[in-house]
Amino acid sequence: MAQRWFDAADVAHDFPDDWVKNKDPKWKDEFLIPLDYARRVSYPSASIYLDGVVKGDQAQIDAYIAACLAVKAKYPKP
């Protein structure tokens, strides 16, 4: 199975599982981000959703859900 990584330009790259142990020198570590990390840091804060719930602001809740769906579309799980 391949591991999906994203570079600084947000382009996906699939590498074999053993790539992490034997990296190709042309790829610099600081420019590659694992898929799970890219997804995790891209989601909006849950406090935005909770704030909308407490205020009864359906537009804010809908915007939060739309932002989450956009992250899921941008970084699909393999």
Image (spheres, rainbow, N blue to C red):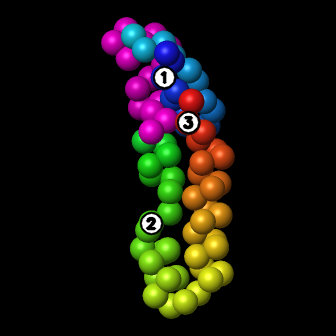
Q: Amino acid at mark 2?
A: Ser
Give the label on residue 34, or none.
none
Q: Is residue 32 magenta?
A: yes
Judging by the rendered image, the residue that carries numbered circle 1 is 3
Mark sitting earlier along the chain (2/3):
2
Per the image, the residue denoted by label 3 is: 77
Q: Residue at x 59, y 41 (%)?
A: 75
Task: Give the residue at the far bottom of this rendering.
Answer: 55
Q: Dot 2: within a 10 Å radius of its alpha carbon, few (fewer than 14), some, or many (20 or more) residues? A: few
Residue 31 appears in view: no
Q: Position of residue 21 (x, y in %)?
A: 33, 12
Q: Amino acid at mark 1?
A: Gln
Distance from disc 2 to disc 3, alpha carbons, whole Å, reads: 20 Å
Picture layout, residue 30 above or below residue 73:
above
For mark 3, give the secondary structure. loop
Tell us which disc is closer to us: 3 or 1.
3
Q: Which quadrant would the C terminus be assigned to in this image?
A: top right
Q: Look at label 3 and name its amino acid.
A: Lys
Which contiguous range is marked in magenta?
19-36
Q: Residue at x 49, y 74 (%)?
A: 49
Whether residue 10 is visible to the viewer of this picture, yes or no, is yes
Contact between marks 3 and 1 (CB within 8 A): the answer is no
- Disc 2: which residue: 45
